[in-house]
Amino acid sequence: MGTATLEVPVTQKTATSARRIKVEIRRQASPDAKATTETFEIPYRPNMNITSLLGEIALNPVDVSGRETTPVTYDSNCLEEICGSCAMLIDGKAMMACSALVDRLLGDKPDKTITLAPLSKFPVVRDLAVDRSVLFENLKAVKAWVPIDGSYDLGAGPRQQPQIQEQRYPLSNCISCTICMEVCPQFNDATGFVGAATIAQAKLFNMDPAGSVLKEERLRALAGDGGIQECGFAQNCVQACPKQLPLTEAISDMGRDVFVQQVKDFFTR
Amino acid sequence: MAAAPRIIVIGGGLAGLSSVIKIAEAGGTVDLFSIVPVKRSHSVCAQGGINAAKDLKGEGDTVLKHFDDTIYGGDFLANQTPVKNMTAQGPAIIDLLDRMGVPFNRTPEGLLDFRRFGGTLYQRTAFAGATTGQQLLYALDEQVRRHESEGKVTKYEGWEFLSAVLDSNGICRGICAMDLRSMEVRTFAADAVILCTGGIGAIFGKSTNSVVCTGSAQSALYQQGAYYANGEFIQVHPTAIPGEDKLRLMSESARGEGGRVWVPRDKNDKRVAKTIPEAERFYFLEEWYPKYGNLVPRDIATRAIHRVVYELGMGIDGQPMVYLDLTHIDRATLNRKLEGILEIYEKFVGDDPREVPMKIFPGMHYTMGGLWVDFEQQTNIPGVFAAGEADYSIHGANRLGANSLLSCIYGGFVAGPKAMQYAKALPAQSGDGGHAAEIARQKQINQGLLTSSGTENPFRIWRELGETMTRHATIIRYNAGLAEADAKIVELLDRARNINLSDKSQWANTSFAFARQLFNMLHLARVVVQGAAVRDESRGAHYKPDFPDRNDEKFLKTTKVSFVDGAPKIEFEEVDTSFIEPRPRTYAATA
């Protein structure tokens, strides 16, 4: 053993190699192409997640009928649920593919077929990859930043009670996965609703001592069509959020602030 | 007046975004290229915190102590001037991040809280829960979004850097890049280019790094004539969660907050961890290194775990794993200071680390080496700068925990203004500056890949590369194994020329893009392996049992590798030791 170098623990392949995982994947070659479904059978290993399953397909892109196909296109990066890339519909539910564990998805039904599909509310790029740039545009609209004077040395920032940090930090954990938007019945072309993530970020920066200088502009951006009034309080967002952001609380706090701002503006502008 | 300098920044992690902010502030125009939307860059994975000697705990910490800890921790291989500058700027960088709204943890009085990290005796690490990298990246991302909305920054997200455009004098005049959706290849003009493309974890197959951390950009530049320095210095983090698809980091901050590493004293002890009495546990780091305890630097902790598992045969249940135990700390404290990483463990392993000791093992984590740069972050290719994990300049033979975020921001803050200064003095190019020739070269490479009708699958070659590199070029290195690894990489390069892409389409073709990265990974892997083979000593993360001691006379030198006739050519350069005299590095009680 003395000469052994770094070996990553290997899972026991022999005992379980016979078992196979069935997965059905919705595929689409390009934004305008027709969607099709392909089924694969992947050799089972303990502790697999959906991204490792997709990696196995890339190693051997052959479907269940033995037909050669192409590796599946999907977004991923950190594989530990912090970059927000790999959101997709897994068994019909919007989830992060990296933290979706196969054992948990199958539960006590090992023969069940897992289904994968792209998020439904965003334009498909290819297969499971979608274009979610609308969120980043929304963040521009609500000026989700602190307008610092400059990046030169201006000394320490203002003191801040730990209680403020403890309220801001959970909102700052948003990974921009857009799952809250996917599951929201109001997030659609008809309403133009900005969605919960953007509203929560507006609250985050309104709570910052220096960021609050843009508070009124943020509230005005959230007033009117597509703004906070579109929320129908379905509360799907808060249940689906993989990072457990207090989204409904943020929406109701911001809703009150937007209303107050509108009244104020009505009399003064 | 001439037009504002046009600078291209590649990579939107902490280093890239830092340089963008400095350039935009100074009146330059930036084109920012990133494979992923910049908010999804690998910097989000950093957990524990960022170092700066603010001395808010009354311990008498100073920037010079931070400087000394960093040089000593890096086993004296880092050039001292840039490290001295970085540590001196640390407090101002923390203040700036605080002003940008980073939700750093606070003391009851409302000041920034600090915790202890590895390789120091001071509480020097500011933190935002256990998701500090994410919080820092977001703060910079928000500032860049503000500059973007003001028209100073144009983002090219979903574009991959392929190469630099060099004119007939070898001066950089822009880049060649590929749109990962339309697969369009084109060149972009620039007066200077800053490469901030992170680490090379993918070369080792499984690591704590993100998918995009392939080192492809650095390798492409190396193959165009840039020096790659200290490639053999690879940090293996002592505490990672072994996984099917990657090794997930378990932050050093777990030990900074009091976490203890142990195994049962009796290797046949099958009892549940919590029922094993204190006296029957072997806290090997605390016993072997009483002064620093669980917070010895990473290379030392990693070798200790390796020794416990492979030499003493004391891994849990005979498996390559040891306990990282937080269960003696109260839940409220754990949630306030470490929640993010505890959730990762819970989600991916299924156990609650507040109740059950975690099972961890070392995993490839950080690239100390990188593109060679001068003290102004410029590579040897005029007009190409580098910053962050992609350059080699700060961490020497081993990086201290919580110094990476600082080095990224510091590097970006130097590279941005220096690139502007360079661009303002740059003479106009003659002819097309090499653009037509470079785009033709890149299109030819693409054509070759798409028409290749061999038998090899690029992902399979990659898997073999990862296994070879992990086996021979991580914690323990032998010259025979390194020679074997190099021969294997040459074989893989050969096989990669016989590739057959199952997907030959020209829309969002990920395996095509991956095949391009694969060639670059293979060339860079040879730099790592050959650098390790030549360095017959042990220093920091580079450890050879056959040469167990540091040898300053022969190897207190930077390894510089250039790409000559398709293979690495190694030379050495003196290290700047102008401030601190090298001394033996020992973290035992007497240090």
Image (cartoon, rainbow, N blue to C red):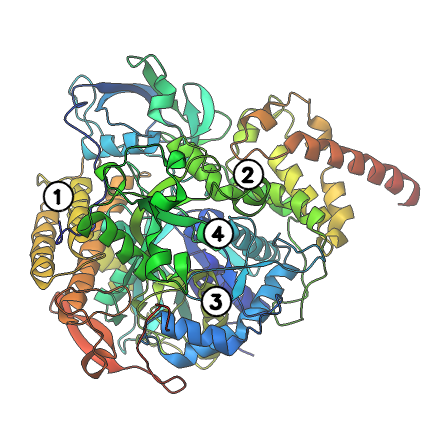
What kind of residue is marked 4? Gly
- Labelled disc at residue A134: 2
Quadrant of the snapshot with the C terminus of chain A: top right
Q: Which of pointers 4 and 2 indicates the residue nearer the eye?
A: 4
Q: Quadrant of residue B350?
A: top left
Q: Residue at x 61, y 54 (%)?
A: B104
Percent position of residue B366, x then y: 33, 57
Q: Are marks 2 and 3 in contact (CB under 8 Å)?
A: no
Percent position of residue B542, x then y: 23, 65
Q: Which of pointers 2 and 3 indicates the residue nearer the eye?
A: 3
SS at mark 1 in the image: loop
What kind of residue is marked 2? Val
- Labelled disc at residue B403: none
SS at mark 3 in the image: loop
User: Compared to B41, does B353 lie above or below?
Assistant: above
| Mark pair 1, 4: CA separation | 50 Å
Rate crowding at label 3 as few (under 14), some (14 to 19) or many (20 or more) other CA atoms within 10 Å: some
The residue carrying mark 4 is B258
Rate crowding at label 4 as few (under 14), some (14 to 19) or many (20 or more) other CA atoms within 10 Å: some
Q: Earlier in the sequence, mark 1 or mark 4?
A: 4
| Mark pair 1, 3: CA separation | 52 Å
Percent position of residue B192, x then y: 41, 71
The residue carrying mark 1 is B499
The residue carrying mark 3 is B121
